[in-house]
């Protein structure tokens, strides 16, 4: 791997999953900056737009958005020596880029922490025990002996990924090595306060009011199944001037109610219903999502989508809970 990368690879393109979150963007911007510092011709192409609160991470090399700049992105993809896929392991999560890459034979390096990789990559760095893809990027860079190339941009970006995917160290964050890496990133200039502020204290007034509306009007609790669901229609999103990223984290709120172990969030988006699932304990939301909502992810955090109407999707969800009663009651 090291010989190949340092020998015959000059141009690289880093691609995170569609609807990229803090880890997908943090890991991608971090690796990109490290590659650029190491002399590679590197860039990040995201399938679609990402939340504006991540923009500050790199003011010089802003990721290109495939949906908005398709021709330019295709030219860059055609000339690249290697593709780095970050924070996903199923080609479906490339969004529209999949159609273009389909006929292209480029070496792929996969760095990811989701279960069951489904991509036939030349090199796979996959570990479901690791907190985030950003942490795996650090491991990868360390294994290649390239830590000296992590500067302020790289350290802020990687720490953003770790903090975003662990909910500020509240889940998937029980391994010693995570804290060793966090310490190293802080040594290299990462600003933990600014990262926390940008991720958690950076919302618009409308987003705050949308959250209030969800919690007071749109949350349905199923005490007998220790479950809850919140849902939003396209009209409601419009009313609150929805911006990408605004509903991130909404799905977590019901889990702070005593006794609730499974939470779902449904919203209408681009003519389909996008769903998110979270759980505490053993309930495997990724299996639930895979079986009923064409999705996947981690045991305690997963997502999916359906072409059902939001009303039908909610009815399906309600009808499924009794079938999972045993698992939900005993977890
Ligand atoms: P979120 O609920 O924040 O959108 O996603 C939570 C987790 O589920 C992430 O790890 C994400 O990668 C995964 N995920 C979200 N949506 C989908 C989807 O449509 N398909 C698959 N396979 N995974 C998803
Ligand atoms: Mn991740």
Image (cartoon, grey):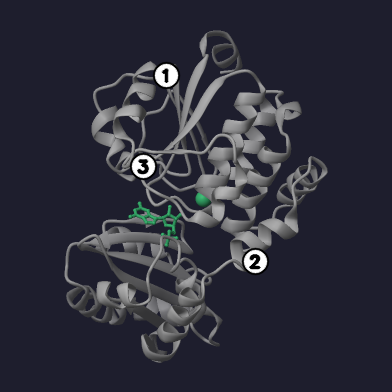
Q: Which residue is mark 2?
A: 170
Q: Which residue is mark 3?
A: 47
Of labels 2 and 1, earlier in sequence is: 1
Q: Please give left or right for residue 138 compared with residue 211 in the image.
A: right
- Taking the spot 79% from the left edge, 47% from the top edge, the residue there is 186
Q: Are marks 1 and 3 in contact (CB under 8 Å)?
A: no
- Taking the spot 55% from the left edge, 49% from the top edge, the residue there is 55
Of labels 1 and 3, earlier in sequence is: 3
- Taking the spot 52% from the left edge, 9% from the top edge, the residue there is 8
Tag of residue 80: 1
Reply above or below: 79 against 290. Answer: above
Mark 1 to mark 3 CA distance (whole Å): 17 Å
Closer to us: mark 2 or mark 1?
A: 1
Secondary element at tag 3: loop
- Residue 62: image location, x then y, percent: 52, 38
Secondary element at tag 2: loop
- Residue 166: image location, x then y, percent: 61, 59
In this view, the residue in front, 71 or 160, is: 71
Closer to us: mark 3 or mark 2?
A: 3
Mark 2 to mark 1 CA distance (whole Å): 38 Å
Q: Quadrant of the N terminus?
A: top right
Q: Please give left or right for residue 188 compared with residue 321 in the image.
A: right
Tag of residue 237: none
Of labels 3 and 2, earlier in sequence is: 3
Mark 3 to mark 2 CA distance (whole Å): 29 Å
- Indicate which quadrant contains ligand 1: bottom left
Q: Please give left or right for residue 164 compared with residue 313 in the image.
A: right
In this view, the residue in front, 301 or 69, is: 69
Q: Within 8 Å of ligand 2, the CB of disc 1? A: no
Res 18 seen here: yes
- Residue 247: image location, x then y, percent: 43, 69
Residue 77: quarter of image:
top left
């Amino acid at each position: 791997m090291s010989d190949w990368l340092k020998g015959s690879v000059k141009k690289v393109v880093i691609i995170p999953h569609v609807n990229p979150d803090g880890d997908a963007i943090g890991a991608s911007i971090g690796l990109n900056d490290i590659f650029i510092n190491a002399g590679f011709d590197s860039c990040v192409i995201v399938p679609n737009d990402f939340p504006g609160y991540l923009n500050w991470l790199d003011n010089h090399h802003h990721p290109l958005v495939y949906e908005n700049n398709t021709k330019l992105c295709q030219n860059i993809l055609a000339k690249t020596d290697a593709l780095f896929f970050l924070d996903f392991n199923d080609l479906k999560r490339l969004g529209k880029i999949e159609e273009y890459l389909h006929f292209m034979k480029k070496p792929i390096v996969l760095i990811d922490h989701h279960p069951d990789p489904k991509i036939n990559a030349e090199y796979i760095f996959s570990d479901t025990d690791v907190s985030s893809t950003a942490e795996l990027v650090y491991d990868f860079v360390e294994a290649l002996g390239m830590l000296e190339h992590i500067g302020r941009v790289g350290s802020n970006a990687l720490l953003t990924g770790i903090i975003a995917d662990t909910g500020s160290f509240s889940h998937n964050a029980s391994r010693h090595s995570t804290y060793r890496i966090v310490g190293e990133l802080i040594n290299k200039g990462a600003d933990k306060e600014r990262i926390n502020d940008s991720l958690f204290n950076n919302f618009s007034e409308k987003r705050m009011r949308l959250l209030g509306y969800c919690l007071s009007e749109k949350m349905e609790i199923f005490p007998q199944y220790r479950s809850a669901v919140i849902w939003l229609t396209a009209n409601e999103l419009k009313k609150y001037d929805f911006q990408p990223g605004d509903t991130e984290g909404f799905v977590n709120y019901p889990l702070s109610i005593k006794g609730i172990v499974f939470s779902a969030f449904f919203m209408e988006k681009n003519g389909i219903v996008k769903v998110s699932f979270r759980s505490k304990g053993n309930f495997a939301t990724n299996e639930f999502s895979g079986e009923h909502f064409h999705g996947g992810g981690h045991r305690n955090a997963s997502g999916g989508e359906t072409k059902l109407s939001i009303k039908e999707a909610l009815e399906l969800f309600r009808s499924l809970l009794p079938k999972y009663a045993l698992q939900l009651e005993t977890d």
